Amino acid sequence: QLVGQSGYLEKVLAGLERVSVARWDTLEIYPGIFFEVRPLFDWGNAWTPPGQLRPAHYGTCNAVYGQLGILYNGDVVLCCADYDGSTRVGNALEEGLLAVLGKPEVARTVEGFRRNRVVHPRCQQCLGGATRTAALARQLGSIFFFKGPGRHFQRTTRLYDL
């Protein structure tokens, strides 16, 4: 119904034109459906040379319960920034989304983040750093950002009227 509303598509397109890749912008294009843009920089140390990374043990992230991803082939990944499936936990087309989300690996990851513990190897890489100082800053920064006042830096714009 919403998509058929007069001017809805134009409103969404106008919202997309205002999105900036220089800040965290989120557009709610439909109830519960978001288009999110944010600077990735070096997604979770993806380009840090092997052997030069200090993995994180502490920190948090809302990716698993706030912004998981479903890739083009149905693979469910723990992170919306996971472009290559390195955090794949199942396939929504083959298993169903609820079955994938009910897996023990997902529960362990969520519980770990709830307790500020990083348990998934890719998450340890993401929140780690090339130096002890960088790793500590990322771990503490993640707690500040996701559980403290940092979460208010995200700008969300709703592009529909109910």
Image (cartoon, grey):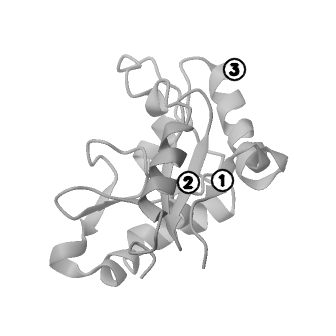
Contact flag, marks 2 and 3 (Cβ < 8 Å): no
Image coordinates for residue 32, horizontal then vertical, percent: 52, 72
Is 72 on the left or on the right of 130, as rendered? Answer: left
Name the residue type under label 2.
Leu
Q: CA distance from mark 3 to mark 1?
A: 32 Å
The disc, 3 or 1, on the residue closer to the chain's N-terminal end is 3
Contact flag, marks 1 and 2 (Cβ < 8 Å): yes
Q: Secondary structure at mark 2?
A: strand
User: Which corner quadrant holds the C terminus?
Assistant: bottom right
Give the residue pinned by disc 3: 133
Q: CA distance from mark 1 to mark 2?
A: 6 Å
Q: Which mark is residue 27?
A: 2
Q: CA distance from mark 2 to mark 3?
A: 34 Å
What residue sits 61% from the left and 39% below the top? 24
Is 33 on the left or on the right of 57, as rendered? Answer: left
Q: Which mark is residue 156?
A: 1
Image coordinates for residue 37, horizontal then vertical, percent: 50, 41
Q: Secondary structure at mark 1?
A: strand
